[in-house]
Image: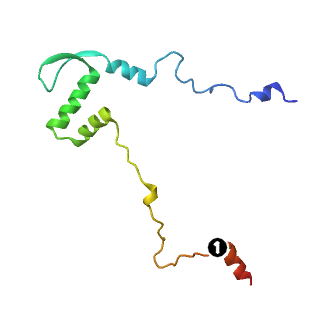
Amino acid sequence: MAREDNLKPFKKGHKMATGRPKGSPNRSTVAKKWLAAMTKGINPETGEEEKMTLEERMTLAQISKAITSKDTSAYNAIMNSAFGMAKETIDLHQIAEQPLFEDVQKDNSDTEDSEADQEK
């Protein structure tokens, strides 16, 4: 018969690490909160002061950087945010079997037959 203390061999948690307290927001929640904060900023495209979120200001700055500085990394970041990363597909049916070493001839015999021939 199993003992009761063997059924749960590990205590929950670790005595040295307390972790994030229950109910406290995680990093992504805090980041989303601050990105949604409303601020006044100058729209780089129109040049007018507008009330917008920090996320909108950052996106507009990235778009402006892609246009004015011809920054391809800024362009890629905007395009990936808007449309998602391009998926690269590989057609495995077109890959032909090729030998590792060109000078070695391909062995077409079965392993069972070659073993039987070696015994004779």
74 or 88: which is nearer to us? 88
- Please count the marks in the image: 1
SS assignment at label 1: loop
Residue 29, quarter of picture:
top left
Q: Residue furthest left?
A: 47
Name the residue that disc number 1 marks. Answer: 110
- Position of the C terminus, as image quadrant, is bottom right
- Give the color scheme: rainbow, by chain, secondary structure or one colour: rainbow
41 or 14: which is nearer to us? 41
109 or 57: which is nearer to us? 109
- Position of the N terminus, as image quadrant, is top right
Which residue is pictured at 16% across the width and 39% down the height? 69
Amino acid residing under circle 1: Asp
Does 80 sit left or right of 65 as displayed? right
Tell me residue 23's x, y (percent).
51, 15
Does 103 sit left or right of 52 as displayed? right
Residue 74, quarter of picture:
top left
Does 7 sit left or right of 44 as displayed? right
Tell me residue 94's x, y (percent).
43, 60
Which residue is pictured at 27% across the width and 21% down the height? 54
Q: Residue furthest right?
A: 1
18 or 8: which is nearer to us? 8
Tell me residue 106's x, y (percent).
53, 76
Does 98 sit left or right of 38 as displayed? right
